[in-house]
Amino acid sequence: MTTARITLTINGTATTLDVPVRMTLADALREKARLTGTHVACEHGVCGACTVLVDGLAVRSCLMLAVQADGAAVTTVEGLARDGALSPLQAAFRDHHALQCGFCTPGILTTMHALLTAEPDADEARIRDVLSGNLCRCTGYLPIVEAVLAARDAYRAPDGGPEAAR
Amino acid sequence: MKPPPFDYACPTSLAEAIDLIARHDGDAKPIAGGQSLMPMLAFRLAAPTLLVDLRRVPGLDGITVDDDGVMLGARVRWCDIEADARLAAACPLLAAAIPHVAHYQIRNRGTVGGSLAHADPAAELPAVALACAAEIVAQGPEGRRTIAADDFLVGPLTTALEPTELIVAVRFPPWPAGRHHGFAEFSRRKGDFAIVGVALFFDDADGAIAGATVVAFGIGDRPQRLAAAEEVLNGAAPSAELFARAAAAAADSVEPQTDIHADGDYRRALLATLLERTLAQSAGLASAS
Amino acid sequence: MSRPNAWIGSPVPRVEDERLVTGRGRFVGDLVPERLLHAVMLRSPQAHGSLRSIDAGAARDLPGVVAVFTAADVGAAGAVPLIPQRQHALPEGEAYRQPVIAVDKVRYVGEPVAVVIAEDPAIAEDALELIEVDIDPLPPVADHVAADSDAALLFEAAGSNRIAVLRARAGDADAAFAAADYTRRAQFGIQRHTALPMEPRGLCATFDPASGRLVLYGATKVPYYNRRALAGMLGLDIAAVDLIEVDVGGGFGARGEIYPEDFLVPFAAMRLGAAVRWIEDRREHLSACNHAREFHADLEIACRRDGTVLALRGRVDADLGAYARTNGFTPPRNVVQFMPGPYRIDHVAIDGHLLVTNKTPAGTYRGPGRFETSFFCERLFDMAAHDLGIDPVAFRRRNLLRKDELPRPFPGIVGVDAATELDNGDYAFVFQRCLDDFGWTEKAALQGRLIDGRYHGIAVASFIEGGGGAPRENARITVEADGGVAVDVGSSAIGQGLATVLSQIAADALGLPMSAVTLRHGSTTLVTEGFGSNHSRSTVMGGSAILVAAEALLAELRTVAAAELGGAATDVRIADGVVHGAAGQRPLSAFAGLSVERTYHNTKYTYSYGTHAAHVAVDPRTGHVEVIDYVTVEDVGRVINPATLHGQVIGAVVQGLGSVFLEHLVYDETGQLLTGSLADYLVPTATDVPRIRGVSLGLERCPNNPLGAKGAGEGGLIATGGVIANAVAAALRSFGVEPNHLPLSPPRVWRLIQEARRRQATPHETGQGAA
């Protein structure tokens, strides 16, 4: 088959998409689900801009076919805000000027959300290590590290676990 | 950078997967994590007519630790290895190497079988498999066979796997108590493929080194055992001077490649430095400069 | 005003961010107009050759393919439009302009030779593989040495690979050299690299055949210029063309110029009467977007015995790649002219040779010419200081321009109208502040020391950054029905937080909260004329235009309000969105529709300046250099938003560290680009970045604009090459290593040490001459 119908949960909503089998998950999210917050900046798995959560794990959506996400739960940057308000991580990015052009930002937010959900006590070295899978050309990374460090508290709080912070 | 056209199948058994691949005359490719294959598709360096997705094939994602050693299913991901606390004792060289693999997101999808089948000469797992004399378990239409890592790794991006065979698992032999090990790599940035890497271990026989195994990667077509260094080490007592001699012998015995990231002379010198430092570290000596 | 300057100077959060952190940004690749078709470019696989034929028959027959265009479709021979010289044009450059699609020759790998339009981008890529291009190979001109020989020519009609020689002159350099106590000559090189914005380029064109109106989305940097130029190239009336700016994922000099695709995409839309979108992929970006920085220099410095620099002379070769693009001459022009930087060097004779080679054409990248000259000169200074036995700090103190020596003109360029002068500043104060913040005195003890297997070194370097590019900028301010104001400005956003900074300026000028200001920028629909964002000009020029327009709007409001509310216009007071007259008050919303547009003119550039200091540790066995500490202090005249400025500084330093250590576009001897992916073209990642301390000061307002601000955002990059190379040289002083070629990759540093060891084993030849 060269096209396929897939059903997946995107940001909590069950979604059925008809996709060419060669289409990456990144392109399917952007072109088929019209969630254009996920950005593609290299399409060969180096820059991290297209990072989304698949079944809770941060993955590069350009290195995954959409058909491989059939049945999966996908969280994109559009799924991070809560009730129309910025999530603590998003707010920390704004407060710490952790973005400039904002093109790499969605992939960094999803990656750091996955990290802090799993490891709310990640220290600066761990944050930098994980962040090294995402390229940013504007900020020099330091404001991003500051923002992520500042957002950790929200992930440690009783109501700030993976569910609430989705 | 859109992938070329191909068909897609998602079989639910190993037999079905092998059958699909066999029926496509070598033009079919298996895909699991896709972390090596997807970039090749994006650059159109690979053009399979059929992709056989292994994600629903049962029995490929287990990690077994027992008296026979460690068995990693082909679909075991790097993050699974990092999360398995048993491996630090059961195969410490493997546990030491895996954090060097690529980046966080890649480690969440990249698989053991994919890395071995891709056989990048600068990748970590093939080097560790070679050092440990691991065996690759492959299955094809003719049945199952076991291939020693040394025979499996043929050349750059080339393995002994038949086009119709799938990697099922990789088996690491038991790790004796008291064995010393070391793993190091030098890359331009953290997470990049190594310019030079070393994976090594040795046993302690009454104060002398025994069974020294030294593997270098990133320097040639495939990871390679450095017999010259092993000969210097075996039977001698660990010392900074010994390690320097072993490193020099290793450097003299290789003809590293030149590419855009480093020339051969640099790689040779770097191999000596990395090896000397890693030996010192693994022996618990203060690292030489 | 009830709150003068409540917003300017405050680190207010950016107005752009809420949209961008929630995935609601709108970038060009996000646009899906009706009947959208997709364009991909077929690019030359060869560096140099004669284009014999293109057979696109099979591609046209592929289902889903709508059209394939080649030069023959664009125009008859000689009628294919050429990319204009937008900036710092030279008459000699005319013969080296690039056709928007290859006509009879290809001159670099990546040059567009055909355009495929299809219903789906993947199908368009499938079609690329079906096009047969017959190219007769010609000898490649692979580097500046081959170019200089003219053995093979890129442009036979022009007769030479040397476009021109730019000669910067001040004083009498040869006489100064003849009389100098000390001279030293050295060769330097900077590798080809590129701006690499995270969002590759992209364009989306819509054309309405009925009205003849063309709209091009994805514009940035200089949309108004590009509208004028593209209208001419496409044969359209300028009024029928609009360029629309949407969110932009980084510019750094490379994005927003006219490239071949800027013509080809709207051309296809016009031909097909459809919407056509082209999103550059990363592989093509590396061979299609402007390259930058490749300079090879042979320079000589003359000093007095006391360390006073008397003169600089020498030759610089610029490898401009295959064509003279829109701003290709800006970097070499800056290199020859700005060589003295913030230092007092009275006698200068620098010849810049502008050479074409079979590589991707070059243009500007953040800090064009400044990064290069800072590297060359700061290296020469440390070499001279060491030879003369003078401390590098004392050497710089002696030669930095004093406050009372400013303003001071830069060397002129023979036959080119290039007059410009340093404006104002206290270079010595900022220099000292940097040393103090860095802890120079304490760290000096580390100089050259071997600690735990690594050699430590520190260095300091000063820079100037040109900004506030002339000639003018426009702003319109309109009172809205809700009591707020709409501010439209000709400046462009490239991801630098422009809307925030300009909103702060507008809010202060009008005495309004920032929330009452709606700022719109970039698109050609907004104001009658705009000049965009380049040369660190958007805050200075856009901000000044807003000030001038705000003043005019307030005057207008006073006049109108006086007529309605009685009293004289001078009695009308406007505060917090309320207009108070003699006989009462009205909310601002009562004056909705009132609108003024004004132009701010300026002929003078701004020069922010500063000093960087760095501490490195070098592993002599691997050649690895770790940056342990990095401090930058700069004076930008007046700080509008300290947080966005700080972000610019840190980001620029990290880009500079990429230039120094990692980034390299490597070509082989046949002109093939070997770094075709981000696995090979390496930019800094989070684990490569040291703690960087950045201090931005507003010491003394710039006298050349009403805002008092100086262009900023490039300075963090400018001094990185000089300061890091000097710190490495200081660390490896015992070897006598001179790191004069970038990048300082581990193999290069290691090799320098090996060569130094061999030299030490066989003494003599130090390469210096005391006259």
Image: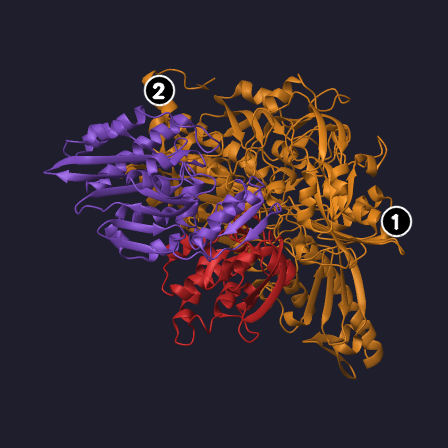
Question: Up-down: is A143 above or below C388?
Answer: below
Image coords of residue B157 (percent x, y): 45, 36
The residue positioned farthest toward the left in the image shown: B206
**Which chain does the residue under circle 2 lie in?**
C
Residue indicated by mark 1: C237
Q: Dot 1: few (<14), some (14–19), or many (≥20) neighbours within 10 Å?
A: some
| SS state under label 2 | helix
> Which one of the lettered chains is coloured purple?
B
Question: Up-down: is B7 above or below B287?
Answer: below
Tell me the CA gap for discs 1 and 2. 67 Å
Question: Up-down: is C361 above or below A25?
Answer: above
For the point 70% across and 25% down, the residue is C49
Question: Up-down: is A38 above or below C309?
Answer: below
Question: Mark on residue C758?
Answer: 2
**Left or right: A18 as drawn, with respect to B227:** right
- The residue lying toward the viewer, choosing from A56 and C480, is A56
> Which one of the lettered chains is coloured orange?
C
Q: Which quadrant holds residue C172?
A: top right
Image coords of residue B89 (percent x, y): 23, 52
- The residue lying toward the viewer, choosing from C97 and A11, is A11
Q: Give the residue type at disc 1.
A: Asp
Question: Mark on residue B111?
Answer: none
Image coords of residue C99 (percent x, y): 77, 34
**Left or right: B83 as drawn, with respect to C600:** left
